[in-house]
Image (spheres, rainbow, N blue to C red):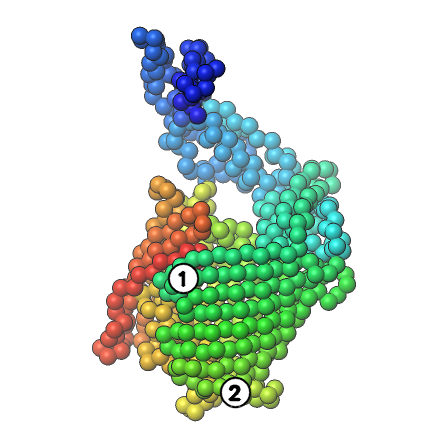
Amino acid sequence: MERRLACGDDKNPPWSDVPANQAKLFLSSFLQGRGYYRPTFTIVDERMVVALGEATLVQEIQTQGAPPTLLISRYWQPPGEPLTPKLLDDLEDWVRSELKATGYPCPTVTSRANTDTGQITVSMVAGAKQVIAAIEADDVPGVDPGVIRRNDAFHVGDEFNNNWLGLTANRITRKDLLLSTHFFARCTPAGAMVSQKSIPGLPRQATAGFGYNTERGPLARATFHNSRLDRTASSYTLNLQLSQRLQNFTARGEWYVLREPTRFHIEPMLQIQRADENTFEARSGKIRLAPASTFDNATYGVAFAFGPALELVRTIRGDGPVYSHIVALDGEARLMTHDFEYYHPTPRSGYALGLGSTLAMRALGSGVDFQRLMFDGQALWNVRDLAPPLIVLGMRGSVASTVIGAGPEHLAELPPMYRHFLGSSTNMRGFARDALPTGGKGALTAAYLGLEARLAAGLPAGLQPLLFYDLGKTGRTSLQLDRPLYYSPGLGMRWQSPLGSLRLTAARGMVAHASADERRGLERWVFYLSFGEEF
């Protein structure tokens, strides 16, 4: 397009001959977009010759009127980059976004640049910090007023944070409750008046996706979701996942039994699964009816569900009873900071904690007595809080144990999926899937800690190299860990492709405090490739 505008287009007769002054105007504009502000134009043999001159590079960014919470030094990329109109627009957008995320709903931001010195000055009028005074929302057809508010990551009276408004919109559209929704703020003496504009769309949505990873081979997933069954926006989701190792069908509902708008609901769930792992093969069916709810404050959100469950298991291969029936109180709870959830597509900060439990009791009619407890967590740090992040540090870990009566006769009653294994892309990346502990019978206790450092910016094409170090232990008895220490240093590469996150890792499995027999076959390199998995 630029070439046709400046040089003409023989295929378009009215534009085949561009006057010199017009071509000069176009070229000047195009060159400014690349940081060249002092080109010279000369006509030689009826041709225009352009000398670009030196590009103007950004040398310094100053601010005027910035509140103490805004540190322009965090915006680290422009110095040394060509000074362009787009760079100024991006800088203004970032400053405006930062102000709106720290209590200033209606900032005015302008910038000016000296094309001789490369100095940029950003001027702003932030105004006074404001709280959310009220929120107005369009009615959703077929849904009671106020129901939409159970997705809010904020409360009226909280300090204004535009990111949490965006997080709320993401939650609503991710659940297919609305096709699209956006928030707008208006500043008043009483605070920020927030209005929500939405497009309802159809309540029923179907999606499908395909992928591949080196642990499970080809992957396929299909989902059907109905998000507005009644005036309280009760919903159900049907999910089918297929791979060589795992086939899973799950039907899950959210039934809002109370008429007034509330986050409390009942979660019915049906799950049918076939697992074909290295250490076992089993088929299972599970139903659960769990009271559930969610909660949000200005920093984090919590979700939990806990209720009675019945599960039937048939073990086809591996250690464990051929047939099992489990009657249990089963549930999970999850805490996630708003920044962890908001930046989930491009992880950079925040933390998430999870707790799960299964309490199976013969007194309830279960064929086996056991208690399984699991805790997991992830935390991310954006080093120096730069924008965009330059180095992201991560830590993730888990502790799990199944408590069952002492003696091999009790262990023999436990189905394989209630035992614990290490070794996969999600924990010990230097060991094959479920390779730990050796022997294939699994462990009653397992603990894992992983550390990671990722270069999130600075390389072409958005490539992000990473280093990691995994540590793990298992125990053949409940609530105890055995002596061998498994660890795996490794490296990898992450690329945020248009289709999702691509990760490639290589890690070396190693064992300490173990005999030669215990180490045999474990200490080797393991390579892994995946789409869609994040730290």
Identify the element where label 2 is drawn: loop
Q: Is residue 108 shown left or right of residue 142? A: left
CA neighbours of label 2 inside 10 A, class few (<14), some (14 to 19), many (20+) = many
Nearer mark to the viewer, of 2 and 1:
1
Q: Position of residue 313 (x, y in %)?
A: 50, 81
> Residue reaching furthest left?
516
How much space separates mark 2 and mark 1, taking CA atoms? 36 Å
Q: Which residue is mark 2?
A: 368
Q: Is residue 217 shown left or right of residue 519? A: right
Whether residue 160 appears in this view of the structure is no
Q: Position of residue 340 (x, y in %)?
A: 51, 54
Identify the element where label 1 is drawn: strand
Disc 1 marks a residue whose amino acid type is Pro
Viewer-side residue, 13 vs 59:
13
The quadrant in which residue 237 appears is bottom right
Mark 2–mark 1 contact, CB under 8 Å?
A: no
**Residue drawn at x 31%, y 76% as measured from the top left:** 484
Disc 2 marks a residue whose amino acid type is Val
Image position of 30 with respect to 186: above or below: above
Q: Position of residue 275 (x, y in %)?
A: 44, 73
Q: Which residue is mark 1?
A: 218
Whether residue 434 appears in this view of the structure is yes
